[in-house]
Amino acid sequence: MAVEPYEKLANAIIEQAAVDYRKALRRLHDFPNDTEAEADKKKIERFFTSVWFSILTTVDGKWLMEALAKEIIEKRGSR
């Protein structure tokens, strides 16, 4: 079964948000006082818990945030 173009777009939006979230988390891990990274993180968390996100996917946004944070911690360790 082929993926519809709107599904591809929805997936691309979510994938980019995940990339950006990882980037913000890595930055905050290395530089805890980075206000720009903190602002990015909060903005993406609002997206992951928004109605818009739930329209794009059936994935639970809170679960996704936890999984991405766990991934960063496992890769970076607890320096």
Image (spheres, rainbow, N blue to C red):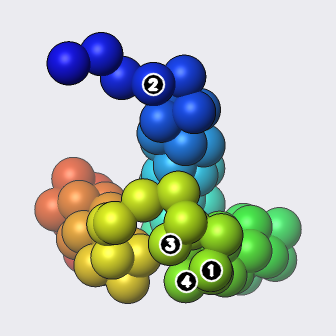
Q: Nearer the viewer, mark 3 or mark 4?
A: 3
- Sequence-wise, the earlier of marks 3 and 4 is 4
If you read the primary sequence from the N terminus, does the residue marked by circle 2 or circle 4 appear first?
Answer: 2
- x 63%, y 81%: residue: 50
Q: CA distance from mark 3 to mark 4?
A: 8 Å
Question: Mark 3–mark 1 contact, CB under 8 Å?
Answer: yes
Residue at 53% x, 57% y is 56
Which badge, 2 or 3, comes first in the chain's sequence?
2
Q: How many neighbours does mark 4 have within 10 angstroms: few (below 14), some (14-19), or many (20 or more)? A: some
Q: Secondary structure at mark 4?
A: loop
Which of disc 1 and disc 2 is earlier in sequence?
Answer: 2
Q: CA distance from mark 2 to mark 3?
A: 18 Å
**Circle 3: residue type:** Ser
Q: Which residue is mark 4?
A: 49
- The quarter of the rendered structure image containing the C terminus is bottom left
Q: In the rendered view of the protein, which quadrant contains the N terminus?
A: top left
Q: Position of residue 65 (x, y in %)?
A: 39, 74
x and y percentages locating residue 43 in the rendered image: 74, 74
Q: Which residue is mark 2?
A: 4
Question: In the rendered structure, are the residues bearing label 3 and label 4 in contact, judged by CB atoms less than 8 Å apart?
Answer: no
